[in-house]
């Protein structure tokens, strides 16, 4: 109901802008006031939820830290998969709600590389819970003004 009322109020402001020249100066403040008032009417829980979240964290490590870590294909990802499997062997099923890997946990993007995808699926199956991790996003030079870049 609040969203519908805000939509109606904003639409009314737009119509007023189109119809009355002198109302133009009041339209922007009216829109801002409507958005602020509407946000105050939307109930948001401010109290912490009861219960706990059981999180497992895996740091895969590599034989050669630094830039040398990327010289061995799939070493980073394989180490995280193995670490996840070992973690689940230690804690047992139903012990965790979430498993977290760090940024660059997958040296290949599992969205485009089938081997990386298979490894991530193996870890996810072993964990039996959601798996949160970072990977690299490569952007071709055509997208970034002639420079190849990589984002986490």
Image (cartoon, helix red, strand yellow):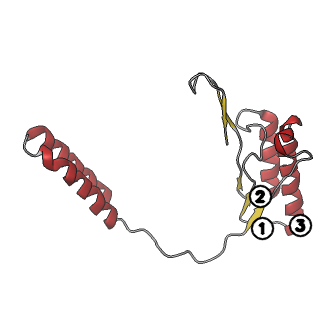
Which of discs 3 and 1 lies nearer the camera? The answer is 3
Q: CA distance from mark 3 to mark 1?
A: 12 Å
Q: Quadrant of the C terminus?
A: top right
User: Where does label 3 land, which residue?
Assistant: 90
Of all residues, the one furthest to the front in this rendering is 66
Q: Quadrant of the N terminus?
A: bottom left
Q: Quadrant of residue 100?
A: bottom right
* Of the pair 100 and 51, the residue shown nearer to us: 100
Image position, residue 71 (x, y; %): 87, 35
Residue 128: numbered disc? 2
Tell me which residue sits at (89%, 67%) in the image.
90
Query: How many other residues sit within 10 Å of disc 3, few (<14), some (14-19) or many (≥20)?
Result: few
Q: CA distance from mark 2 to mark 3?
A: 14 Å
SS class, disc 1: loop
The reply to whether callout 2 and callout 3 are in contact (CB within 8 Å) is no
Of all residues, the one furthest to the right in this rendering is 63
Q: In the rendered view, does 94 fall on the left or right side of 8?
A: right
Query: How many other residues sit within 10 Å of disc 1, few (<14), some (14-19) or many (≥20)?
Result: few
Image position, residue 106 (x, y; %): 77, 43
Please report whichever mark, 1 or 2, sits nearer to the chain's N-terminal start: 1
Tell me which residue sits at (14%, 46%) in the image.
25
The reply to whether callout 1 and callout 2 are in contact (CB within 8 Å) is yes
SS class, disc 2: loop
Q: In the rendered view, does 53 fall on the left or right side of 30?
A: right
| Position of 42 relative to 67 (above/below) | below
- Mark yes or no: residue 5 visible: no
Q: In the rendered view, does 31 fall on the left or right side of 138?
A: left
- Mark yes or no: residue 66 visible: yes
User: Where does label 1 land, which residue?
Assistant: 94
């Amino acid at each position: 109901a609040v969203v519908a009322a805000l939509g109606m109020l904003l639409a009314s402001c737009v119509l007023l802008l189109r119809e009355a020249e002198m109302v133009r100066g009041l339209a922007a403040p009216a829109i801002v006031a409507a958005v602020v008032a509407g946000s105050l009417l939307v109930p948001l829980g401010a109290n912490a939820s009861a219960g706990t979240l059981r999180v497992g964290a895996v740091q895969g490590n590599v034989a050669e830290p630094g830039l040398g870590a990327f010289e061995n294909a799939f070493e980073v990802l394989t180490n995280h998969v193995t670490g996840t499997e070992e973690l689940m062997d230690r804690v047992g099923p139903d012990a965790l709600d979430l498993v977290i890997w760090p940024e660059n946990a997958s040296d290949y993007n599992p969205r485009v590389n089938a081997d990386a995808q298979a490894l991530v699926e193996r870890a996810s199956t072993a964990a039996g819970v959601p798996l949160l991790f970072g990977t690299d996003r490569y952007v071709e030079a055509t997208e970034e003004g002639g420079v190849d870049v990589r984002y986490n």
